[in-house]
Image (cartoon, rainbow, N blue to C red):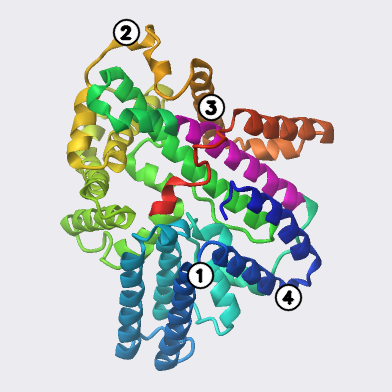
Amino acid sequence: MQFVSLSFLLLLPLAAIINFIIPRKFRYIWLLVISVAFYLSIDLKAAAVMAGTVVVTYASALLMEKVSGDGSKKKSPGAMAILAVSVIIEIAAMLVFRSDKIMGAIGISFYMLKSVGYLVDVYRGDLKAEHNFCKLALFVSFFTQVISGPIERAGNMLPQFSYPVTVDFDRMRDGFLQILWGYFLKLVIADRLAIFVNTVYGAPASMDGSIVAIATLFYTFEIYCDFAGYSAIAIGVSRILGIDVMKNFDSPYMAKSIAEFWRRWHISLSTWLRDYVYISLGGNRKGTVRKYLNILIVFAVSGIWHGSALTFLVWGILHAVYQIIGFVTMPLRDKVSDILKIDRGGLSHRTVKTVVTFLLVNFAWIFFRATTLEHAVTIIKKSFEFTPWVFTDGSLFNLGLSQASFNVGVAGIALLITMDILSFNGVEIRDRIIKQAIWYRWIIMIAAILSILIFGIWGAGYNASSFIYQQF
């Protein structure tokens, strides 16, 4: 069962109605029942691995609490040993089972990171071990998050299970609007661009150079719309069920530096890596050289987490190198700006920085999408072969998308950029819609639903149910 499947669309209203009716203090039990049913509908073995993760996580946290003393922040050798063994077990399970397609379908990498983060929090004394097995199980297995995140923290989720909010019409309406936006990003933009990208990247050597460059640009927006679309659906569904989930994307392509990009892209993963890897390695507290080394390690870990292919490692290291170069050259750039009297807060300077950052991210995505390093090199070489005739000879429309469908994809990208610019400047369109008169809100929602139904990618032969990040 996937978010864009008919069975899920039929399940959600039923789940929301029962969740609304059931007494709040028992709501977490109902949410756990839904989550268990969700995994059992996918595969029994996958559900068994999930159950094993829950048992290991639950027992390890209680044992650490016991050997350290209730509420103590003292890091006893026994607690450290328990943490090490439990983390090794869970990471080993992730590496062993992640290659299984079924396991990938339920995002084993995502719920394993949630579990590891919880165990580290308990070990550090930042969080007390959860004694209610069902609540801990729900945290690990909450079905809206586990396929592709967000990678939530126990400190945010567990209190919501114990003290649930009232689910009212405003929450449901807000959640529904987020779900609509997520479906639009996924079905109208991402899945449409994927057709073009898959065709071109399948045989880049035989394509005109500008077509390969366009495909790379399309992939930059495809992966954003795919992943941000899933996150929007997950956040919206959670909100309808009375759970507030952290924001996972914040106009990342508006960033003016690579460091800022990672504060806006896949926020739940980047903050997880910061809190549990970067800080554990010493962060920036042990000198400049160690800081740069830690950045390299963190992004190498990020690359390996995304996949075992060497291309993912290169992608991660590229982002680390970008940031290190940015830190090293900052004094020189500051001096040049002072000499030339450049207004660093001016629109033109900020625009240049945003464009440069976008191009660097765009280049790195080539390695993320390519199947091998040789494949990536071919794509890069072809991208620099400027072939202007492709914009007039119609060849753009012979790569899986008709001219009309191609134009819909471009229009979707334009709409996304507009929405991100507004959000970046503090204008939340969803809030503006909610404040409008009821007839205006209904017109917008009906128009959004019709756009998804008319322009979404549907039909036999194309799997619109899979999200890119499921494989990670």
Q: Nearer the viewer, mark 1 or mark 2?
A: 1
From the viewer's side, name the closer residue of 199 and 380: 199
Identity of the amino acid at label 3?
A: Gly
Q: Is residue 66 above or below residue 299?
A: below
Q: Is residue 98 above or below residue 442?
A: below
Q: Residues within 10 Å of mark 1 (few under 14, many from 20)?
A: few
Identity of the amino acid at label 4?
A: Lys
Say which residue label 2 marks.
389
Q: Nearer the viewer, mark 2 or mark 4?
A: 2
Q: Is residue 424 above or below residue 230?
A: above
Q: Quadrant of residue 370?
A: top left
As helix, strand or loop, the secondary structure at mark 1 comes to: helix
Residue 44: which disc?
A: 1
- The Cα–Cα distance between marks 2 and 4, rounded to whole angstroms, is 65 Å
- Residue range in magenta is 170-193
Q: Earlier in the sequence, mark 2 or mark 4?
A: 4
